[in-house]
């Protein structure tokens, strides 16, 4: 909402810019620009008005609104970093206003900057106690920080007043379930990872998985020109049964990334997993962290899983044989059908084929065009354009052509 302040006798016309002299002139020009969606111009005018009368609350609020509108526009193209910059300015201009604090908190969450998100959202709640959006975001931030107790406190408060918030009850129950399983777990903070272990996990084991994670951190990050998460990544380790209790996933699932990497350290019989097995699983999940960092939530399933498979292990002879059979019997999926998350509900056998096909497809792209091209693909995806469009722009192929090219390599 933009407000004008009334000055007697002010004439507003198209040529005003040439002779605008008072704060009011500039404010009115700012409003005109704002109303037509020209937020950069609006900001220039409000800035001049602000310089002339820095104490004027209306001008401050107008300037804040224009920064928020600009931030909103940038967020739509996934440029959350620049959006956040506008909001930080908005907050200094209009410090009594909770709205930019809440908006900034949500973008920090999107950027995985959890500590900053918590800080800003707590500030917002001081200004507007009881604001449900702020409390919900704060609950989500605590959850991301693996602080179940504070997360449930915030989420529970919101759910009591508004039980139908999208996905919130689900998140509350997830936090509750994990809080029970992880009650006696111990955390260990490394520079790149915040790890949580069941108690009594030997130090040698803890050191070993931290080494694996750090290796993945540097090697995968560097492949894409230096992609590193802004804050340490949460990694929760479990025994096999605890893993199933916490995640509710079947025992064909080796590990998962749902915003946090979750990985069992043992098999269902309680035997330690080998270093090789742990390395494959953790590296696979860490690729998902990097993909999210590059493309947000926009990477299609086949690309996300395919890349994770390619960068965590090689296609062995058995896998190649299965692929040959799959393509010769035309059992492969339409890539369009391999875009969504619902795939995890496939039967284990079909899911295995879906992974294999994704592996083969990304392996084909990687071998032919390498990591930089893949980074371009991720950059396009980050802006929210459909996956097949991004593919055509970067690799000059649609799904059908890509599928045919990959199938040909298994003839
Ligand atoms: Zn995966």
Image (tube, helix red, strand yellow):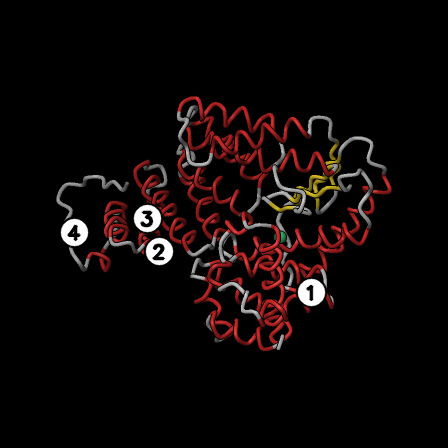
Marking on residue 12: 4
What residue sits 72% from the left and 65% below the top? Answer: 318
**Reading the chain from its start, which is encountered first: label 2 or label 4?**
4
Marks 2,4: beta carbons within 8 A: no
Q: In terms of secondary structure, where does tag 1 sit?
A: helix
Give residue 160's position: percent from left, percent from top: 44, 22
What residue sits 56% from the left and 69% below the top? Answer: 329
**Reading the chain from its start, which is encountered first: label 1 or label 2?**
2
Marks 3,4: beta carbons within 8 A: no
Q: In terms of secondary structure, where does tag 4 sit?
A: loop
Give residue 179's position: percent from left, percent from top: 63, 28
Displayed quadrant of residue 218: bottom right
Displayed quadrant of residue 177: top right
Determine which residue is flagged by label 3.
Answer: 46
**Reading the chain from its start, which is encountered first: label 3 or label 4?**
4
Question: Callout 4: 10 Å neighbours few (<14), some, many (20+)?
Answer: few
Which part of the image, by quadrant, shows the C terminus?
bottom right
Whether residue 211 is visible: yes
Q: CA distance from mark 1 to mark 2?
A: 54 Å
Which part of the image, by quadrant, shows the N terminus?
top left
Nearer the camera: disc 1 or disc 4: 1
Determine which residue is flagged by label 1.
Answer: 319
Determine which residue is flagged by label 2.
Answer: 40
């Amino acid at each position: 909402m933009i407000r004008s302040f009334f000055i007697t006798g002010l004439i507003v016309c198209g040529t005003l810019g040439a002779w605008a002299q008072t704060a009011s002139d500039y404010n009115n020009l700012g409003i005109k620009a704002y109303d037509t969606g020209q937020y950069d111009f609006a900001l220039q005018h409000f800035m001049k008005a602000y310089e002339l009368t820095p104490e004027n609350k209306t001008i401050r609020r107008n300037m804040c609104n224009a920064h928020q509108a600009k931030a909103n526009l940038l967020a739509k193209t996934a440029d959350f970093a620049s959006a956040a910059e506008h909001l930080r300015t908005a907050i200094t201009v209009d410090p009594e206003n909770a709205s930019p604090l809440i908006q900034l908190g949500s973008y920090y969450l999107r950027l995985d900057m959890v500590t900053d998100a918590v800080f800003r959202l707590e500030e917002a709640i001081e200004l507007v106690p009881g604001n449900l959006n702020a409390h919900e975001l704060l609950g989500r931030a605590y959850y991301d920080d693996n602080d179940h107790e504070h997360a449930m406190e915030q989420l529970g408060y919101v759910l009591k007043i508004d039980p139908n918030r999208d996905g919130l009850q689900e998140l509350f129950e997830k936090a509750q379930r994990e809080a029970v399983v992880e009650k006696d777990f111990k955390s260990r903070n490394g520079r790149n990872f915040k790890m949580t272990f069941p108690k009594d996990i030997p130090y040698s084991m803890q050191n070993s998985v931290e080494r694996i994670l750090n290796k993945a951190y540097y090697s995968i990050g560097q492949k894409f020109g230096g992609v590193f998460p802004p804050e340490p990544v949460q990694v929760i380790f479990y025994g096999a049964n605890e893993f199933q209790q916490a995640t509710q996933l079947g025992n064909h699932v080796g590990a998962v990334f749902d915003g946090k990497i979750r990985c069992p350290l043992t098999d269902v019989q309680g035997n330690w997993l080998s270093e090789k097995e742990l390395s494959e699983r953790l590296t696979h999940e860490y690729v998902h962290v990097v993909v999210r960092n590059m493309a947000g939530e926009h990477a299609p399933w086949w690309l996300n899983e395919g890349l994770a498979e390619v960068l965590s292990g090689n296609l062995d002879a058995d896998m190649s044989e299965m692929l040959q059979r799959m393509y010769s019997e035309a059992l492969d999926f339409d890539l369009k059908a391999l875009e969504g998350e619902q795939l995890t509900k496939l039967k284990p056998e079909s899911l295995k084929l879906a992974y294999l096909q994704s592996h083969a497809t990304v392996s084909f792209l990687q071998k032919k065009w390498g990591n930089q091209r893949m980074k371009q693909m991720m950059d396009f995806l980050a802006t929210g354009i459909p996956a097949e469009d991004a593919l055509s722009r970067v690799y000059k192929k649609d799904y059908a052509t890509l599928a045919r090219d990959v199938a040909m390599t298994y003839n």
